[in-house]
Amino acid sequence: MGTIDLAVLDDSQFVRTYSGSVHPVAANFHRFVEAVARTGHFGRVRYLVPVRSLRIWEDDPRLPAVDQDVLEVVPTAPFGGSLDYLMRSPYLTVRNWGLINNAVAASDVVWLRLPASNAPIALLAARRHGVPHFSGVAGSAGQDAHARAIPSRLDVAAPAVNAMFVQMARSAARSGPVATLGDDLFYGVIGADVVETSLEWAADHTAERHAERLVGWLRPQFPHLPW
């Protein structure tokens, strides 16, 4: 096992079951993070994601649980999309600042999966503690941002929300490198009509095939780290 401690910030929504397992609601990006953690270059990998409890009337999640032997889940406050985050940003910032700040301070490098509503907090924490960061942006980040942004009845707010995400990405790029990764890593939101495809993807080795490629890209970006 490596000695590099990594913090990964992701906006994907997760639910915690009564047994304590943590499952994504509609994305499989955690499988890629797990694959990166298993490359052997990293020590602790903290996964900062919004987590809520499974509601009593909900069925058990269908998507694979996070492997908590590989990823240390740091549960940030849940929210119902980016517009909801903006409307409750003072409360959510207060709730999340301590968790994100402590996780970043204890890490050697921070990975921001953009777009992410909590990214400004993570960027501020990284700059405060002098922790380097990089960003991962999907090839279809624009559509991804729109899909997360707001319910259809509030589409009028989409341009403003997406402009916020663009500005966020530019801010991150000014102080850290940016990796563009393919859509086959399921950066985007998974709709109910493609859950079966998602489950099939989770069973193959797509994530493992790309994990070493990402690590290879990171080495020259952060040569001071003990690779």
Image: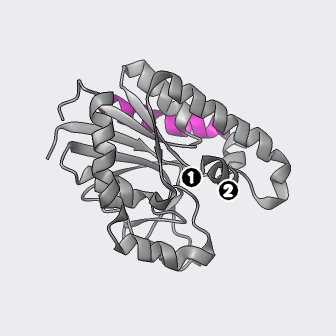
Residue on which disc 1 sits: 78
Q: Identify the residue at image location x=27%, y=50%.
A: 212
Label located before the other in sequence (1 or 2): 1
Pointer 1 local density, CA inside 10 Å: few below 14, some 14–19, many at least 20? some
Where residue 174 appears, as percent x and y from the top left, is 52, 22
Depth check: give the residue in front, 132 or 78: 132
Q: CA distance from mark 1 to mark 2?
A: 17 Å
Q: Identify the residue at image location x=78%, y=39%.
A: 160
Is 175 left, or right, of 225 in this rendering?
right
Where residue 50 appears, as percent x and y from the top left, is 51, 52
Looking at the rendered structure, the kind of residue marked 1 is Pro
Residue on which disc 2 sits: 147
Q: Is residue 91 magenta?
A: yes
Mark 1 vs mark 2: give the one in front.
2
Where residue 201 appears, as percent x and y from the top left, is 42, 71
Q: Is residue 225 magenta?
A: no
Q: Which residues are magenta?
A: 89-107
Magenta span: predominant SS is: helix
Depth check: give the residue in front, 92 or 132: 132
Q: Identify the residue at image location x=43%, y=77%.
A: 200
Looking at the rendered structure, the kind of residue marked 2 is Ala
Is 91 left, or right, of 129 in this rendering?
right
Relative height, residue 172 to residue 31 (above, below): above
